[in-house]
Image (cartoon, rainbow, N blue to C red):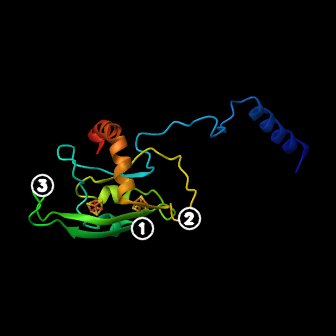
Amino acid sequence: MSVIDIAKGMGLTLGYMFKRPVTVQYPRDKVTIQPRFRGRHHLLRHPDTGLEKCIGCSLCAAACPAYAIYVEAAENDPADPVSPGERYAKIYEINMLRCIFCGFCEESCPVDSIVETHIHEYHFEQRGENIVTKPKLLALGDRLEKEIAERRAADAPYR
Ligand code: SF4
Ligand code: SF4
């Protein structure tokens, strides 16, 4: 290595010292979340009836490359006045420690029930909290229903 090579290297270093840093001081500085960012999952309901959309078909579980989803299906009572005999997910669980946020579950769902949102800041404090159950997924969906609908409408022309 010659003196010229060292000078070139030092020149490059000096040049970068006066450029704007690309490192973001997260979490103090927030980063821009892109519209199609895949974060935490939610389960949605039918807006008109309030019934859960999921029909327990297990397509999301079959598509999941990380085996993170567990579904057990059941059928409503045939005499049920609202949805007689309708199939639903008796158990729906996602193991968030397995999930790689690939989005295959959302893509494979025939009824647009499972949705990934922009939420990426969350934590678990107790053993087992990484298994997110159906009531929790539905509650999150209820809370963000309007926002999810707006995001989907904005993305619709490109799907
Ligand atoms: S995002 Fe991918 S890895 Fe995570 S639950 Fe869905 S299919 Fe599985
Ligand atoms: S979330 Fe969708 S794909 Fe998964 S079991 Fe329910 S209906 Fe089927």
Residue type beneath disc 3: Val
Q: CA distance from mark 3 to mark 2?
A: 37 Å
Are the residues at dot 3 and dot 2 in contact (C-beta closer than 8 Å)?
Answer: no
> Viewer-proximal residue, 123 or 116?
123
Residue type beneath disc 1: Pro
Q: Is residue 126 left or right of residue 8?
A: left
Question: Could you tell me which quadrant the C terminus lies in?
Answer: top left
Q: CA distance from mark 1 to mark 3?
A: 35 Å
Mark closer to the chain start, 3 or 2: 3
- Residue at (58%, 36%) from the top-left corner? 30
Residue type beneath disc 2: Arg
Per the image, the residue denoted by label 2 is 127
**Rendering coords of residue 4 (x, y %):** 87, 41
- Give the number of the mark in front: 1 or 2: 2
Mark closer to the chain start, 1 or 3: 1
Are the residues at dot 1 and dot 3 in contact (C-beta closer than 8 Å)?
Answer: no
Cβ of mark 1 under 8 Å from ligand 1: the answer is yes
**Rendering coords of residue 123 (x, y %):** 55, 52
- Residue at (91%, 43%) from the top-left corner? 3
Q: Which mark is residue 82?
A: 3
Q: CA distance from mark 1 to mark 2?
A: 23 Å
For the residue carrying disc 1, how many other residues have a C-alpha within 10 Å: few (<14), some (14-19), or many (20+)? some
Mark closer to the chain start, 1 or 2: 1
Q: Which mark is residue 65?
A: 1
Q: Quadrant of residue 52?
A: bottom left
- Residue at (35%, 37%) from the top-left corner? 147
As helix, strand or loop, the secondary structure at mark 3 comes to: loop
For the residue carrying disc 2, how many other residues have a C-alpha within 10 Å: few (<14), some (14-19), or many (20+)? few
Quarter containing ligand 1?
A: bottom left
Q: Which mark is residue 49?
A: none
> Viewer-proximal residue, 86 or 98?
86
